[in-house]
Amino acid sequence: MSTATASTVADTCAAAKTAARTLASMPSSTKDAALEAIAQELLSREEEILQANAEDMRAGREAGLSEALLDRLMLDRQRLGGIAAALRDVAALHDPVGEVVEGGRLANGLSVRKVRVPLGVVAVVYEARPNVTIDATALCLKSGNAIVLRGSSTASSSNAVLAAIASQAAQRAGLPAGCIGLLGGGREELAELATQTETVDLIIPRGGEGLKKALSEVATVPVIYAASGNCHVYVDRGAELQMARAIVLNAKVQRPGVCNAAETLLVDEAVAERYLPPIAEDLLAAGVSLHVDEAGRALAGSLAERMAPASEEDWATEYLEMTMAVRVVDGVQEAIEHISRYGSGHSEAIVTGDLAAARAFQVGVDAACVYVNASTRFTDGGELGMGAEIGNSTQKLHARGPIGLRELCAVKYLVEGDGHIRG
Amino acid sequence: MSTATASTVADTCAAAKTAARTLASMPSSTKDAALEAIAQELLSREEEILQANAEDMRAGREAGLSEALLDRLMLDRQRLGGIAAALRDVAALHDPVGEVVEGGRLANGLSVRKVRVPLGVVAVVYEARPNVTIDATALCLKSGNAIVLRGSSTASSSNAVLAAIASQAAQRAGLPAGCIGLLGGGREELAELATQTETVDLIIPRGGEGLKKALSEVATVPVIYAASGNCHVYVDRGAELQMARAIVLNAKVQRPGVCNAAETLLVDEAVAERYLPPIAEDLLAAGVSLHVDEAGRALAGSLAERMAPASEEDWATEYLEMTMAVRVVDGVQEAIEHISRYGSGHSEAIVTGDLAAARAFQVGVDAACVYVNASTRFTDGGELGMGAEIGNSTQKLHARGPIGLRELCAVKYLVEGDGHIRG
């Protein structure tokens, strides 16, 4: 384990690169056995892990961390069990390495296969939660990548023990030394990591806008930024209104602090009079503050008193809390226009029974995930059948939407001939 | 056409973004008809194009451009015919937009489809050749993208006429205004283009290291850099030596100035004595200068006098001319090691009849295209069955190898339910 020898960032990344070359050709069975070995080792060394975590918790309390942060930092027997279970879930997934994406035989007899291969070295930069140390390691190793971890300094004792255990178990199971590297949590380490273009193939930051800004200013290594989500639900005139109430309520309140939660409700004027009062009741009863445009408040009757006027700023805001903006639009086209202007390209939903409206929305909305008659909350690698995810991308290149095992791969063309030369 | 109104870079890109939203949902038939209309218009306005090109040629001669550059700049009736034919070839390709990449129904009944969608606005930055104006336009429009062209100022008259003709023909065929934008050829325009993150989704530079450096210093828009290619052919002990002679000769001399030409020949020591003298004869007879390691020269007999010693620098050099480095290695593993150390991840070939060696090479070599018993010269979108290419990528994210129509697309998840909410 790299921190044990106080090696530099460059050394850790170089060791990961060397390990990656071996990892790339390892069979799934070896990688899966390593994940199982890590799971067992974590469970059998529970005391050691919880002790290290208690140190971080003590230091965190002394440093005055908020209760929310302390909760993220905390490990207990149950959470450790969850981490071990997640390792086994990843081990059970299909190995993406070697999958033939496209292929065929050309007219001249050359055989061409485009196959998935590991990216090489993936660095994951994350904040307090120590479980990410293991979750991210599982996804990277399963996809044949070496991983360089750069966690938060508030979790340094927990991360050091977790990474050491994972590294030892992985090596005993036959994975190469260096395949799990851990860096210190300082800004200097981050800046040095961000420029290791010779050895690091991708950096995935899991954190807020501060981390994004810090990285984007210095990174020369490719970065896939996790998403901010200004997500909308549009209730069309063709909607079954009971369904639309359930979907909007779910999209807003089931877990308001995450990127796939809905922030703005767009209502077709043709159903606004019937739909707005009951959904407003639902949302207000659930504790949601409503910021509503003039047309919406005019239809809300006595409920209007409990609504705030919506401003331009509301359309552009990702609240990440129990607040929702509401706007009346004149149909699906205006909904698409609104989303095009204010959306962040994350998750957008239409509720409708009208096929033409659904198709127009699917084609016209430019986002990672476009939903018809389902909640935006399904944007998640686990929910969408990808098994697990290491983050969620709203960028268009390489990975858009959940970053799962396949998205941690590149491709390679394998071309076979019988002495073919170009004429 | 944007230059006609002397609009700014930002205006041109914004107009392209607006056009891109319409283009994204246009059926293949409309896009194909537009490419055909451009082809016809180019042929019918030949005089006008050749006159503009003659102006560029005159200015180029006065400015003292080299004959090689002037040749790239030059258009004549035959070359225009080639440009029109290329448009029709692209029109005949399969439209990537809407292709379902993956899909299925989840356990909870949600239908998930991952489909290809256009990236949006693609900017292409290129040097002298005016044909790129049309070739790049064809690939971008076919894949549903708007294009912003930034050609060389040496070709400004040619590019202006070509882009104006293409833009007029495309609009008459029903494509939206703004879908083809042309910028001036100055450094300021390039720097401004490189930061249009709100409107430009991707920049593809087609040019040398100077352009790459200029862009990488300023770009905040995603860029896919075209490749440099330090490509190898490894002749294994299991090779049929006649085949190996033909492949090495082809890979080196058929067109030495391009990125998929071979630069270094690696020879297995087990066959070096039999293989090296005849291939050296072939290469020397073809006019290739040979830079050979000590072991190789020791086996070359009297030919050694016509060889230069190879140094570390040779292994790392992309000659792009009639020079080849030669090294004797002790087998496929050492060949893989050498390629891993010096290769640029472009195109690598093994010649062998031995299946284990072929498989080891395919898995162990980390490059965009890995060949067994075929010349590296096939790395090209047209040759590999992708129809055409806009460049060749050695980066791992998004596009690796030829950048064809599919690589000019992003993906989008379409999720359909019956009122699904997350529990």
Image: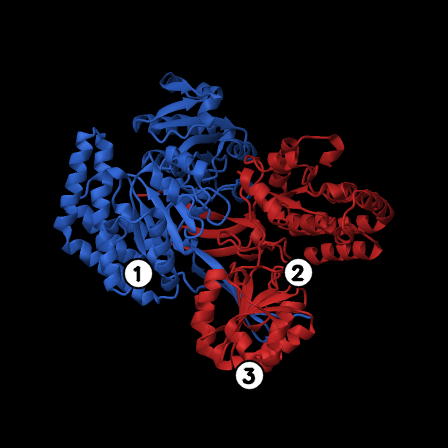
Chain colours: A blue, B red
Q: Camera-side residue: B174 or A295?
A: B174
Q: Is B352 on the left-hand or right-hand side of A409?
A: right
* Left or right relative to B185: residue A367: left
Mark 3 vs mark 1, CA separation in Å: 50 Å
For the residue labelled by badge 1, is the local secondary structure a helix, a strand or a loop?
loop
Chain to which the residue tagged by mark 1 belongs: A
The location of residue B36, given as percent across then percent down, is 75, 52
Q: Which mark is residue B274?
A: 3
Residue drawn at x 64%, y 45% as measured from the top left? B124
The amino acid at mark 1 is Ala
Q: Indicate left or right for B27 with A221 as reference.
A: right
Q: Amino acid at mark 3?
A: Arg
Locate the C terminus of chain B by quadrant. top left
| Amino acid, disc 2 | Gly
- Tag 1 residue: A92
Q: Residues within 10 Å of mark 2 (few under 14, many from 20)?
A: some
* Image x and y of residue A74, in percent: 19, 40
Tell which of B110 and A101 is nearer to you.
Answer: A101
Residue B253 image offset from top left, x and y in percent: 66, 68
Q: Are marks 2 and 1 in contact (CB under 8 Å)?
A: no
Q: Is residue A273 visible?
A: no
Find disc 2 in the rendering and name its residue. Answer: B257
